[in-house]
Image (tube, rainbow, N blue to C red):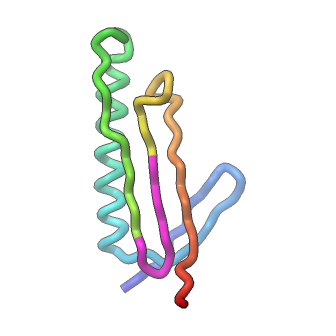
Amino acid sequence: MTQPITLNLADGSVRFSFSGAAAQELKTALDELMTALKSTASEAGEPSRRSSASALEHRYTGDVFLEVFCNPNIWPSPFAAKVLITLGTIVSA
């Protein structure tokens, strides 16, 4: 069963249908990203010992196509990291 979800963005918001299972998978992926960012933040004082964190690349295809991507290693600090969100509709041929 899908439920509407709203993503609040800097310049507005977008609402789309999302299943509970897909929302849980996204939450798990985001929790892992936050853990990696916090780990990187605790090591930020020692740049020579800074370890690389895994990039988040999460995809969902259902009523819509949703992709969430973040590579925490390309940002100067974990506090500057940004997430790229791609949202599109599924068109049947």
Picture quadrant of residue 3: bottom left
In the image, residue 22 above or below residue 49:
below
Question: Where does the N terminus fall, quadrant-wise?
Answer: bottom left
The residue lying furthest to the bottom in this view is 93
Asked whether residue 66 is drawn in magenta, I would say: yes
Q: Residue at x 53, y 80 (%)?
A: 90
Given residues 65 and 35, the one toward you in this image is 65
Q: Is residue 19 left or right of residue 7?
A: left
From the image, give the main secondary structure of the stretch colored magenta. strand
The residue lying furthest to the right in this view is 11
Question: Where does the C terminus fall, quadrant-wise?
Answer: bottom right
Q: Measuring from the top left, give residue 89's x and y in whole percent.
A: 57, 76
Q: How many marks?
A: 0
Q: Residue at x 29, y 28 (%)?
A: 39
Q: Measuring from the top left, give residue 59's x and y in whole percent.
A: 40, 63
Q: Residue at x 32, y 9 (%)?
A: 48
In the image, residue 69 above or below residue 74:
below
Q: Measuring from the top left, give residue 28's x and y in whole percent.
A: 29, 55
Asked whether residue 58 is drawn in magenta, I would say: no
In the image, residue 93 above or below residue 87:
below
Q: Residue at x 42, y 73 (%)?
A: 61
Picture quadrant of residue 47: top left
Magenta stretch: give its range. 61-69
Q: Measuring from the top left, give residue 15's x and y in whole percent.
A: 58, 71
